């Protein structure tokens, strides 16, 4: 499962990341329901970002169980 052709590098360790999940979320700023792509690197750092805004920086995922 990928959201774009180029996987991002981990902001913590710069390792390649894999998209491990998609989470449907409500975006507070515009009220839209949009998926967040959950990304994980080999060191198990967990990040997510809006799937419709791949150019925006990733945010730390507040749900560490996604990486379990």
Image (tube, helix red, strand yellow):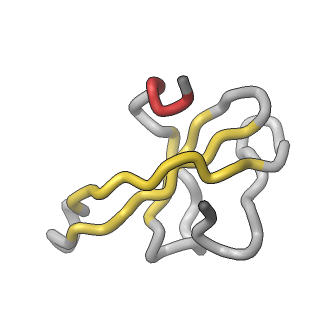
The image shows a total of numbered marks equal to: 0
**Residue 33, quarter of picture:** bottom left
Horizontally, is 16 left or right of 53 in the view? right
Horizontally, is 9 left or right of 21 in the view? right
Above or below residue 44? Residue 47 is below
Above or below residue 43? Residue 29 is below
Which residue is the extreme one toward the front? 1
Q: Locate the C terminus and report the quarter of the image it occupies.
A: top right
Residue at x 76%, y 70% (from the top left corner): 6
Residue 18 x, y percent position in the rendering? 69, 50
Which residue is the extreme one toward the left? 31
Q: Locate the N terminus and report the quarter of the image it occupies.
A: bottom right
**Residue 41, quarter of picture:** top right
Horizontally, is 54 left or right of 23 in the view? right
Residue 46 x, y percent position in the rendering? 58, 36
Above or below residue 34? Residue 25 is above
Seen from the viewer's position, the closer of residues 37 and 60 is 37
Seen from the viewer's position, the closer of residues 68 and 59 is 68
Residue at x 62%, y 53% (from the top left corner): 19
Residue at x 47%, y 26% (from the top left corner): 64
Seen from the viewer's position, the closer of residues 65 and 12 is 65
Residue 17 x, y percent position in the rendering? 73, 48
């Amino acid at each position: 499962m990928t959201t774009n052709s180029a996987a991002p590098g981990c902001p913590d360790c710069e390792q390649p990341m894999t998209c491990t999940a998609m989470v449907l979320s409500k975006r507070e700023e515009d009220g839209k329901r949009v998926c967040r792509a959950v990304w994980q690197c080999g060191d198990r750092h967990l990040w997510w970002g809006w799937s419709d805004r791949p150019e925006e920086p990733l945010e730390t995922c507040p749900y560490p169980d996604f990486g379990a």
